[in-house]
Amino acid sequence: MIEMRNVKVRWVKDGEERVSVVAYDESSAKRRVKELEAQEGISDVRAVPVPLGA
């Protein structure tokens, strides 16, 4: 059985921590992390597991 996990993405922009509004599956979260890391002025990008339905 495949375990599904929801993941939100957190990052810092202009000194303010942000968090994604949507929850991603793990592969989509990895893609979003890479997109954010490529943007100037964004730091501390990370994927954080959240409970299903969050």
Image: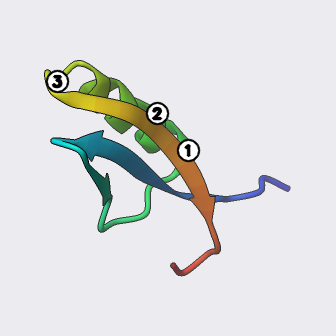
Give residue 39's mark: 3
Element class at badge 3: loop
In terms of image quadrants, where is residue 33? top left
Mark 2 residue crowding within 10 angstroms, few (<14) / some (14–19) / many (20+)? some
Residue 4 in picture, x, y percent from top left? 68, 59
What amino acid does circle 1 point to? Glu
User: Disc 3 versus disc 1: distance between alpha carbons?
Assistant: 21 Å
> Are the residues flagged by discs 2 and 1 in contact, CB closer than 8 Å?
yes
Q: Earlier in the sequence, mark 3 or mark 1?
A: 1
Element class at badge 1: helix
User: Disc 2 versus disc 1: distance between alpha carbons?
Assistant: 6 Å
What amino acid does circle 3 point to? Gln
Give residue 14's mark: none
What residue is shown with label 1?
26
Residue 27 in picture, x, y percent from top left? 51, 37
| 53 displayed left or right of 29 | right
